[in-house]
Image (cartoon, rainbow, N blue to C red):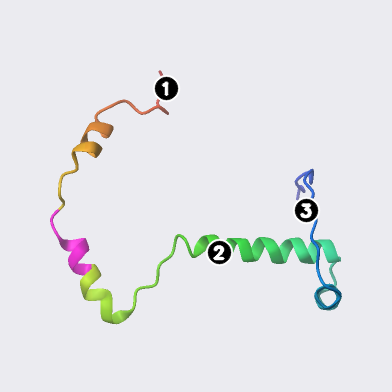
Amino acid sequence: MTTAMKDERLALRVTVAQKAIIERASNVMGRTLTDFSVSALVERAEDVLADQRVFHIPSDRWAEIEALMDAPVTPNPGLVDLFSKPSVFAAR
């Protein structure tokens, strides 16, 4: 297993109480304060970003969503124009 080079630094200011609880939790997990903190921050960041990609629809609104998805597609002239041009990512 290779470890990515850690060349960025992140400085945080916390209260005495915040630091104490973070230190206790990292000790319980048998991890360094840095490793525990970075893992917790990354996990929380991933959760926040997932909330931007995954949407939960209440069951009482599902029929409305289904009707929208089943409705006929309305042509979008802007998209038709865009997709008629070669991709900027295609090899030239």
On the rendered structure, is 88 left or right of 37? left
Residue 15's place in the image compared with 77, above or below, is below
Q: Earlier in the sequence, mark 1 or mark 2?
A: 2
Q: CA distance from mark 2 to mark 3?
A: 19 Å
Highlighted magenta segment, given as a residue range: 66-72
User: Residue sitting at 23 percent across and 37 percent down?
Assistant: 78
Please name the residue that numbered disc 2 is placed on.
48
- Of residues 3 and 73, the one nearer the viewer is 73
Amino acid type, mark 3: Leu
Most common SS among magenta residues: helix
Measured in 3D between alpha carbons, the distance from the residue under mark 1 to the one under mark 3, in whole angstroms, is: 39 Å
Which residue has dot 3 on it? 10
Residue at (81%, 68%) from the top-left corner?
14
Nearest-to-viewer mark from 1 and 3? 3
Mark sitting on residue 73: none
* Picture coordinates of residue 10, whole percent (x, y): 77, 53
Q: Is residue 40 left or right of residue 75?
A: right
Mark positioned earlier in the residue sequence (1 or 3): 3
Locate residue 38: give its quadrant.
bottom right
Q: Position of residue 59 (x, y in %)?
A: 30, 80
Pointer 1: what residue?
Answer: 91
